[in-house]
Amino acid sequence: MHAPVLVLKDSLKRESGTKVHHANIQASKAVADIIRTTLGPRSMLKMLLDAAGGIVVTNDGNSILRELDLAHPAAKSMIELSRTQDEEVGDGTTSVIVLAGEMLHVAEAFIEKNYHPTVICRAYNKALEDAVAVLDKIAMSIDVNDRSTVLGLVKSCIGTKFTSQFGDLIADLAIDATTTVGVDLGQGLREVDIKKYIKVEKVPGGQLEDSKVLKGVMINKDVVAPGKMKRKIVNPRIILLDCPLEYKKGENQTNAELVREEDWEVLLKMEEEYIENLCMQILKFKPDLVITEKGLSDLACHYLSKAGVSAIRRVRKTDNNRIAKASGAVIVNRPDELQESDVGTGTGLFEVKKIGDEFFAFIVDCKDPKACTVLLRGASKDLLNEVERNLQDAMSVARNIIKNPKLVPGGGATELTVSATLKQKSSSVEGIEKWPYEAAAIAFEAIPRTLAQNCGVNVIRTMTALQGKHANGENAWTGIDGNTGAIADMKERKIWDAYNVKAQTFKTAIEAACMLLRIDDIVSGIKKQAPGAGQAPSKPKVETEADADGEQILPD
């Protein structure tokens, strides 16, 4: 007999074949089950403890998965799904996971029957193409400028979130904010940059009803010399700088030896004159408000306040950009390069208000602001964080609609229509791919089924009734009203979804399912001998949200 040949090291574990498929499918189903209860308007909240011991209370699929620490590689890739969905369209994070989990679940039966994964994947991809075609067919276009339609859409999107109890409030905020910062690119395209130009300021205290979208910008700063400078200016002329208004220090350390005492005075005088010069260059333009990203020395402060100019220093770069967008000013790097056109005159009011125990500078009532701040008030920090997440989702939906004004029915109606169409088509699919194709059609029903489950109605009865209604294809808009669990026409109930959210959901879910099905080998236990592997692994540095928007941001 030959001696057994060792190929892999002892420390390596290798699993292959169907075992891996089953493991992956189980893992993905486990992830889907965690998230399943957060789908729909009757959704539950999850409470998570993060590494720093803080708590996160949310039902946003992406936020939940972000906090989970998973060991299984397949489950990790499920998490990537919802992150992709979140970055791409901002909504539908939960449905992606539920759908992908279901796709894998129906594939399990075929793997047991020794179907080859590529066959299943081929069928799935075919199903995906047909599903998107169905979406195109039932989508209806809307007019972006018709506020009530957009409001209905954003509302049905946030209906599944915690803030739905505050009615139109969040939806209004989201629409206001996104329509404010929309920029026309020509050819009927609109670009809405939520990340850059909409700042969400959370100030604990007050009630949620006090939240509003400011027609301008708010920053968490006070003027430099509160006693001397004006705190309220109507129609201010604003100058934005990103250079320090103080004496320039040498790049490297320099020593100067002074022999005569008068030279010292000359030196000091030069510094003073330098700063006076800077201030005079600025004051030539008669500004009322000077904002700089860098420092502002006491002397410069004195010159400015003597001229009746308010100044704010050390403003974040991102905030400065927003002020520039809102007021129409141009950020200037050197005071001697100032021009009249750089002065921002588009603002109606500058004032400093005290909210809670902090001072906030408001630059509001802008004529045509291209940036805005959403001011959120609320009882507790956890509440505010959740509201902020919901607002992000709502703004994403509003943005999607502005970019691609097409609607599909919500409430599981789209999925049911797709499912019914695919079932009819499956009879014309040739060969062995027919069965997985049909299974994919059935998998789409996971979304309405989960909705029904979360409402607590009789799932089987509701689903059969719905399937019957869709099978004869009379009305593509029949779905489940997520609040009552009753079968209703989505058009009348104004339960809608954005077209590109749905399309993205289907694509992401099916592609991910295919990817996980094609894995047939997992080799684990690869140890790279890193230098200093002897010590215990150091604790990972946990980044909080606070330092994400910190000063050390790289230039855009």
Image (spheres, rainbow, N blue to C red):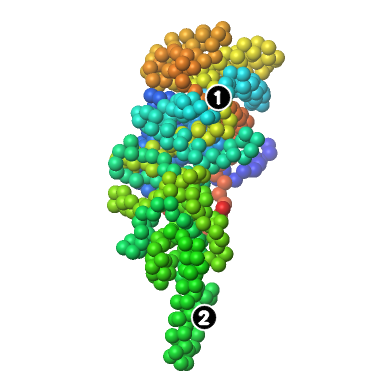
Residue in the picture at 46% in, 60% down: 287
Quadrant location, the N terminus: top right
Of residue 461 and residue 235, the one placed in the foreground of this image is 235
x then y, percent, for residue 209: 33, 36
| Count of all numbered marks drawn on residues in the image | 2
* Mark 1 vs 2, N-terminal side: 1
The residue that appears at 57% across and 46% down in the rendered structure is: 526
Looking at the rendered structure, the kind of residue marked 2 is Thr
Give the camera-side residue of 136 and 531: 136
**Badge 1 amino acid:** Ile
Is residue 81 positioned above or below 241 on the image? above
- Residue located 41% across and 62% down the image: 309
| Residue at which label 1 appears | 142
Relative to residue 462, is residue 92 depicted above or below?
below
> Could you tell me if the residues under marks 1 and 2 are in contact, i.e. CB atoms within 8 Å?
no
Instruction: Classify residue 488 by image quadrant.
Output: top left
Q: Which mark is residue 254?
A: 2
Q: Position of residue 533 (x, y in %)?
A: 51, 56
